[in-house]
Amino acid sequence: GENVEQHPSTLSVQEGDSAVIKCTYSDSASNYFPWYKQELGKRPQLIIDIRSNVGEKKDQRIAVTLNKTAKHFSLHITETQPEDSAVYFCAFLAGSYQLTFGKGTKLSVIP
Amino acid sequence: NAGVMQNPRHLVRRRGQEARLRCSPMKGHSHVYWYRQLPEEGLKFMVYLQKENIIDESGMPKERFSAEFPKEGPSILRIQQVVRGDSAAYFCASSPKGGGDTQYFGPGTRLTVL
């Protein structure tokens, strides 16, 4: 079946530093790649997404890059803050509607 | 604009009982998806429904699990004769359209089977 590999599984950074999370996916036909942030006990919240007709998208301190040839995409968070601490999931659209999720990256921002 | 609503938020059942999980999509959304999340894991797709139709239930176990999205009222995920392995967080998501439209998640129902 379709799958996505997400790395690293845990990431600790000092406040103000950057964090990068990478995902590699299997479905070359996929054209939609969202990132979700999940705080403990809460719902996954969409923080940014990218479609395959662009290579990069930025929203304030968050950016996502997509390399369709290599089938990988990355989340970049700059100037990290303690409230960025959460689990981040990458996902891609397998088929026309089914999201396939990575296993998550637990980000800890140390004040 | 209320987001996706799920209830109950927490549900405790004994082995062999039935669990009924409800999901009300965002206003204007007619597409509902159910996902299951085990501890320390990502979300796994279970079923995709539109009003009165199951479009894809390929991720849902064939036995004991069923889902519906009636013309009126919330979508229901039903688990009969629950077992300990059913303990998980169940999230539903909704979108206004299918086909790659953005999915917005509800707060989840945390099911514990004793």
Image (cartoon, coloured by chain):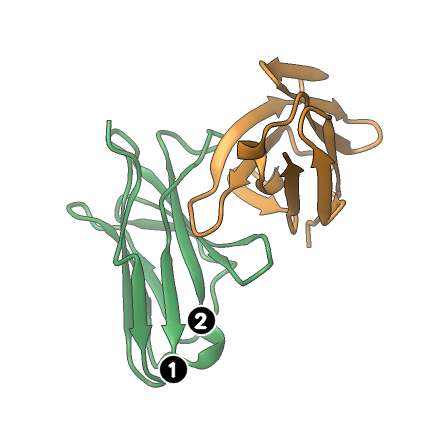
Chain colours: A orange, B green
* For residue B93, above or below residue B100: below
* For residue A52, above or below residue B92: above
Q: Position of residue B13 (x, y in %)?
A: 31, 77
| Chain to which the residue tagged by mark 1 belongs | B
Disc 2: CA contacts within 10 A as few (<14), some (14-19) or many (>=20): many
The amino acid on which the numbered mark 2 sits, given as a three-letter code, is Ser
Residue under the image location 47 percent in, 63 percent down? B60
- Residue at the far bottom: name it: B16
Q: Is residue A54 visible?
A: no
Q: Position of residue A26 (x, y in %)?
A: 75, 43
Distance from disc 2 to disc 1, alpha carbons, whole Å, reads: 9 Å
SS category of the residue bearing label 2: loop
Which residue has dot 2 on it?
Answer: B87
* For residue B29, above or below residue B18: above
The label on residue A6 is: none
Mark earlier in primary sequence (2, 1): 2
Residue under the image location 39 percent in, 30 percent down? B97
Q: Position of residue A10 (x, y in %)?
A: 71, 48
